[in-house]
Image (cartoon, helix red, strand yellow):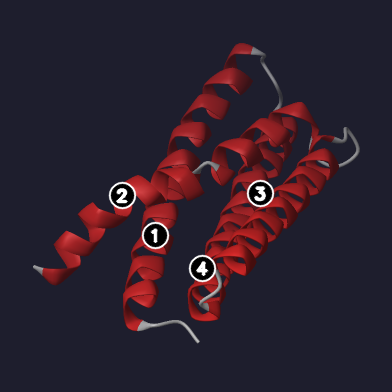
Amino acid sequence: MLDNKVKRTLKCMMIGSLIYNVVLLIVSLIIFILICKVKNLNSNDTLIFIVKNELCVLIGLVCSIIGLYSMAISLSKAISANDEKYAKKHMVLMSTVRMIVFCIILVIVINERTFGITGGIMFALAILSVKISAYLAPVIEKNIRS
């Protein structure tokens, strides 16, 4: 269903998303360790705090990969329809559905019983990888071709 150019771009965007989230994991791990030292948390509380927030980044990574794949499928379907009105409606509908799903997941993550506000921030930062990967995709594609 996806043509070769869309597959290649999707692959590059997924790699960009992965790179961004790995950097986010490393930077946030360092920041969380420093925060826990400043707050003088014991080792169990520190471990729980770090694992919960790093898990939110991983949830965001999975959601961003699924979102990227959903965008690629929507784009291919809209292009193959050869109907401008249908393509616009389809793209707007699918974009809205993705946004609603991301917001629902964010509300679930922010709930204090699950991960809390810090986890919500980490999830939101991880979801930003969709946007960042769009900027990184041409660079990654250029490096893959070389």
Q: Nearer the viewer, mark 1 or mark 3?
A: 1
Q: Nearer the viewer, mark 4 or mark 1?
A: 4
On the image, the x and y values in percent for residue 28 come to: 51, 33
Do the CB atoms of the residues marked 4 and 2 lie less than 8 Å apart? no
Q: Amino acid at mark 1?
A: Met
Give the alpha-carbon distance from disc 1 to disc 3, as whole Å.
21 Å
- The tag on residue 43 is none
Residue where numbered disc 4 is placed: 75
Residue where numbered disc 3 is placed: 55
Q: Residues within 10 Å of mark 3 (few under 14, many from 20)?
A: some
Do the CB atoms of the residues marked 2 and 1 lie less than 8 Å apart? yes
Give the alpha-carbon distance from disc 2 to disc 3, as whole Å.
24 Å
Secondary structure under the numbered disc 4 in the rendered image: helix
Residue where numbered disc 2 is placed: 136
Q: Which sits in the foreground, 45 or 68?
A: 68
* First in sequence: mark 2 vs mark 1: 1
Residue 52 vs residue 1: left or right?
Answer: right
Give the alpha-carbon distance from disc 2 to disc 1, as whole Å.
7 Å
Q: Amino acid at mark 2?
A: Leu
Residue drawn at 33 percent across, 46 percent down: 135
Q: Residues within 10 Å of mark 2 (few under 14, many from 20)?
A: many
On the image, the x and y values in percent for residue 27 come to: 44, 33
Q: Residues within 10 Å of mark 4 (few under 14, many from 20)?
A: some
| Residue extending farthest top | 38
